Image: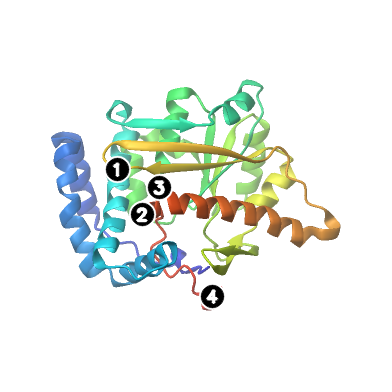
Amino acid sequence: MSRQWFQQRERGSPFALKLIRWIALHLGRRVARLFLYPITLYFLVMATEQRRASRDYLSRVFSHKVSLWHIATHIHCFAATILDRVYFLTDQHERFEVQIYNAELIFDYVETGQGGILLGSHLGSFEVLRSLAVKQQLPLKVLMYQDHNQIITRIFEALNPDIADTVINLGEANALLKVSENVAEGKWVGMLGDRVAESDKITECQFLGTKTSFPAGPILVAAALKVPIILVFGLYRGDNRYEIHFELLAEELIINRQQRQTDIQYWAQCYANRLEYYLHTAPYNWFNFYDYWNQNNL
């Protein structure tokens, strides 16, 4: 797995993003969605690196050559979820149909005051989970690199300033201490486990037919805190339909000192297997538009 996502140049000017935000809020979702087509065409033509990455990924998940139509569909799906963030962040939840599967897995813990780790990915929309947190009082924090994609982050935070308070900045030295404190208070900390950053410890997993590096951090954090770790996948199903799937990875993730690397790899592979399963159910939902399998960047 490549680390180049962290250095990838952010596309889209502040003016263009603010224009789309204005259109979404003042002209409505139906009109705003019409703009997804020229946006898709623009990125299909101009974003060479992202187009190449999409082709590589889609050829793996489909196991055959893909056309520009497949790539355009992939980009359009991504653009649609970005647009919908505007509505989720401005509490317009009534616009969407959200099906939730196995919600009791996490809410049973919440009722007892037990905190834990929610392990997600760049599959679909994590924003739909934040929407659930607001509507159903799920005490949620999100661990992320706040300095990455600063333009879009600032524009969306302006829609809902309270959203910044839910973020634990992974770029800060005391980030893991904050994770521990919040989990001890009964909160659930969301992490994304499908990208390797520069300083990450890694483990190797089989993923879409290739040995791939995954970050070991989420596994190590859950094991150190001795808390449940639940997988979460927020899938975009087209139009205004979303799904949230919860799956228990472990009630308490135990790593044996004598076989530390083996245990880490086992749990990471369990995560990779479930991620791959959902990729096959919603192939256009995976939004890692960079050279994901370039081992030279490890």
- Per the model, the C-alpha gap separating discs 2 and 4 is 23 Å
- Nearer to us of marks 3 and 2 is 2
Q: Find disc 3 in the rendering and name its residue.
A: 124
Vertical side of 281 occupied by 288: above or below: below
Q: Mark 2 near mark 1, Cβ–Cβ under 8 Å?
A: no
Q: Name the quarter where the C terminus is drawn.
A: bottom right
Amino acid found under the numbered disc labelled 1: Gly
Quarter of the image for residue 190 reads: top right
Quarter of the image for residue 84 reads: top left
Q: Mark 3 near mark 2, Cβ–Cβ under 8 Å?
A: no
Residue 160 is marked as none
Residue farthest to the bottom, as pictured: 296
Give the mark nearer the N terminus: 3 vs 2.
Answer: 3
- Nearer to us of marks 2 and 4 is 2
Q: Find disc 4 in the rendering and name its residue.
A: 295
Residue at screen point 78% across, 58% down: 260
